């Protein structure tokens, strides 16, 4: 027959301390899962009414999608996906820009962002390349790496549209414009 044993008070205090410590350590993880928490990074893919992009050596082309990625509270990447060149292969134009000091970034929660007020970005680089839905590289005989240029210009994001224009030091000009729904 089992006899009940009294638990020493020192073990009870140790168990309480361990439980309190575990709760305190898990509190940041619980806050991180809070869906109302604002984050510094995320994506915004607006619905488009119309879209066109232009790059050196190519005729202006329609766009299929624009993806705005806020990499941190001040660094943005705007991807303009052009027309399909071959099955699963698109043309992609990317502007990388910096948000001026004291300007407000996109509002992001759980990596999904919204534009609340107009934003103007200062462009630092432009990139252009064929893009496969499974990533960069060769597909059906296409061998290409992205072309990247230091550039200066601006991207303006507002509730009606997005417009980017940048120029390399060598004179090449890239533009892209989208009207939003």
Image: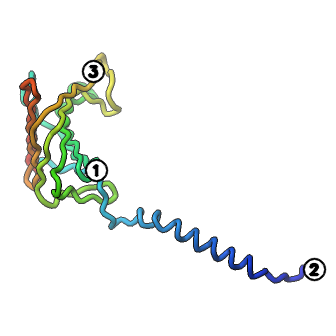
Task: Categorize mark 3 by other alpha carbons within 10 Å: few (<14), some (14-19), many (20+).
Answer: few
What residue did someone put label 3 on? Answer: 144
159, 124: nearer the viewer? 124
For marks 3 and 1 on the same chain, the one whose residue lies earlier in the sequence: 1
Mark 2 vs 3, N-terminal side: 2
- Judging from the image, the colouring scheme is rainbow
Image quarter in which the N terminus is found: bottom right
Residue 78 picture quarter: top left
Front residue (pair 53, 40): 40
Where residue 179 sits: x, y (%)? Answer: 8, 47
| Residue carrying label 1 | 72
Question: Image height check: is 65 above or below 132?
Answer: below
179 displayed left or right of 136: left
Mark 2 secondary-structure assignment: loop
Towards the viewer: 165 or 91: 165
Residue on which disc 2 sits = 1
Tell me where residue 146 appears, x and y as whole percent. Answer: 25, 26
Q: Position of residue 61 (x, y in %)?
A: 10, 31
Task: Please tell me whether mark 1 sits on a helix, a strand or a loop.
Answer: loop
Q: Secondary structure at mark 3?
A: loop
| Residue at x 11%, y 36% (from the top left corner) | 152
Q: CA distance from mark 2 to mark 3?
A: 79 Å
Quote the CA–CA distance across marks 3 and 1. Answer: 29 Å
Q: Is residue 52 visible?
A: no
Instruction: Name the quadrant containing residue 163.
Output: top left
| Residues at marks 1 and 2, CA–CA distance in whole angstroms | 65 Å
Horizontal relation, residue 99 to residue 54: left or right: right
């Amino acid at each position: 027959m089992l006899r009940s044993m009294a638990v020493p008070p020192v073990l009870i205090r140790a168990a309480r301390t361990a439980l309190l410590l575990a709760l305190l350590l898990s509190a940041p993880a619980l806050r991180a899962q809070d869906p109302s928490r604002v984050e510094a990074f995320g994506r915004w893919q607006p619905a488009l009414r119309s879209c066109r992009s232009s790059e050196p050596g190519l005729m202006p082309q329609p766009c299929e999608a624009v993806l705005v990625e806020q990499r941190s509270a001040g660094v943005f990447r705007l991807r303009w996906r052009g027309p399909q060149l071959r099955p699963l292969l698109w043309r992609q134009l990317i502007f990388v820009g910096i948000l001026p000091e004291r300007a407000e970034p996109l509002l992001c929660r759980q990596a999904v962002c919204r534009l609340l007020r107009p934003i103007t970005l200062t462009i630092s680089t432009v990139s252009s390349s064929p893009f496969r839905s499974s990533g960069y590289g060769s597909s059906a005989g296409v061998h290409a790496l992205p072309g990247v240029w230091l550039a200066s210009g601006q991207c303006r994001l507002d509730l009606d549209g997005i417009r980017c224009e940048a120029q390399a030091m060598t004179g090449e000009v890239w533009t892209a414009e989208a009207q939003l729904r």
